Image (spheres, helix red, strand yellow):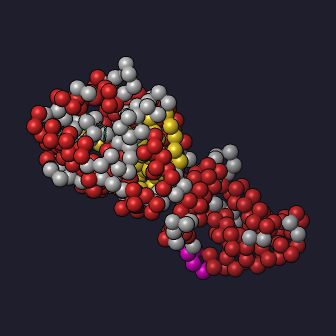
Amino acid sequence: MTDQPTGKLLHHRAEGPESAPPLLLGPSLGTSLALWDGLAPELSAAHRVVRWDLPGHGGSPADLIGPGATVADLADLVLALADSLGIGRFAYAGVSLGGAVGLHLAAHRPERIERLAVICSSAHFNGARPWEERAELVRREGLAPVAASADDRWFTPGFTVPRLVEDHRTADPGAYAACCDALAAFDLRERLPSITVPTLLVAGREDPATPPSHLREIADAVPGSALAEIPGASHLAPAERPEAVLAALRGHFDGYPGRGMEVRRQVLGDAHVDRAQSRQTPFTARFQDFISRYAWGEVWTDPTLARRERSMITMTALVAHGHLDELAMHVRAARRNGLTPEEIGAVLLQTAVYCGVPAANSAFAVAQRVLAEEDAAPDGA
Ligand SMILES: O=C(O)CC1=CCC(=O)O1
């Protein structure tokens, strides 16, 4: 685990294997990366988890933002942090203001976001006035009056997390007020239908700040998104019901296409996958995601069968159904998975018995062409 105060970057903590797919975790206003204490150890078993602090909160410098800050400014700071860590695309989960940062990134920088979870957050925070008033109060009197009501705003009655309330009390008033400015100006409703990143919305059923109706509004507008409601949780659901939020996040991030994509590239080759990715449109995005997660992230990654065995099964099924374009792709994949041309020929001969001679005849023609092309240009895909 590394925990680095960094000059002009957001303070962050990185956990989990460096080679695992990256998952960035964003906090809510007034809290710190400690908001994720109940989930980060579990999530970092399968991800490189990087949790960050808002400016002037936790360990982040206060002067990273100033009056009139926007959620776009915070999103730029998150991207600068990712850049500094050598992270290109990443999965992202954020709570409240941290979730707004995730929505902004998914809408404006989708090439950086693999999957998104937006927790106890909203596409708008009930207009500018309450946040302008809160910013004014904090600039005038510091954080004590606002921190005094933290338990009521964040948790169900009788629950608290003293560490988070203390983080709230000790945040930098100027940076906190600048975050309020960002919330005042934030309204992403019109952009929601353009989001193509696979998105999960998580609502605390008792959340007065961003009630389930706000998350439902996002779920209704973002194509293909899913909504989970957490009973017995208010605004800081990851702190109050960590096990329930963890289960929802695992369902969303595990079988994660990061791993699926890796296997897909190994089997089908970079050129093919890059081509498929570049042709992706909002219309096909969910199908591409489905393929990456299920076909490659779950089935092809299951170690029960060797990859060469999976290649034999796949070619047979493609011959049986006459999918000759897909067969060409999987003859190339079979070579990458270690099958020799003789073994591929033996598979196709067997299909003549079970799928029929005409089907095998077409398959042999396709395979012969592909093998000849492979001979001529072994790395072409
Ligand atoms: O602080 C609150 O009252 C609730 C909240 C709104 C945005 C955020 O991050 O927290």
User: Regarding ligand 1, which quadrant of the image does it lie in?
Assistant: top left
**Residue pictured at 41% horizontal, 28% vertical:** 240
Residue 235, position as x, y percentages in the image: 38, 34
Residue 247, position as x, y percentages in the image: 52, 35
Q: Which of the 4 image quadrants contains residue 311?
A: bottom right
**Residue pictured at 45% horizontal, 55% vertical:** 114
**Residue pictured at 17% horizontal, 53% vertical:** 68
**Residue pictured at 31% horizontal, 39% vertical:** 28
Q: Which of the 4 image quadrants contains residue 52?
A: top left
Q: How many marks?
A: 0
Q: Magenta segment range?
A: 375-380
Q: Is residue 379 magenta?
A: yes
Left or right, residue 223 beside residue 102: right
Residue 292: in sight, yes or no?
no
Residue nearest the observer in this picture, 104 or 115: 104
Residue 155: in sight, yes or no?
yes
Residue 107, position as x, y percentages in the image: 39, 60
Residue 356, position as x, y percentages in the image: 88, 69
Q: Is residue 127 magenta?
A: no
**Which residue is situated farthest in the left direction here?**
140
Residue nearest the observer in this picture, 19 or 243: 243
Q: Quadrant of the N terminus?
A: top left
Q: Quadrant of the C terminus?
A: bottom right
Left or right, residue 132 beside residue 225: left
Residue nearest the observer in this picture, 339 or 40: 40
Q: Is residue 310 above or below residue 369?
A: above
Q: What secondary structure is the magenta-colored segment mainly?
A: loop
Q: Is residue 378 above or below residue 177?
A: below
Left or right, residue 126 beside residue 213: left
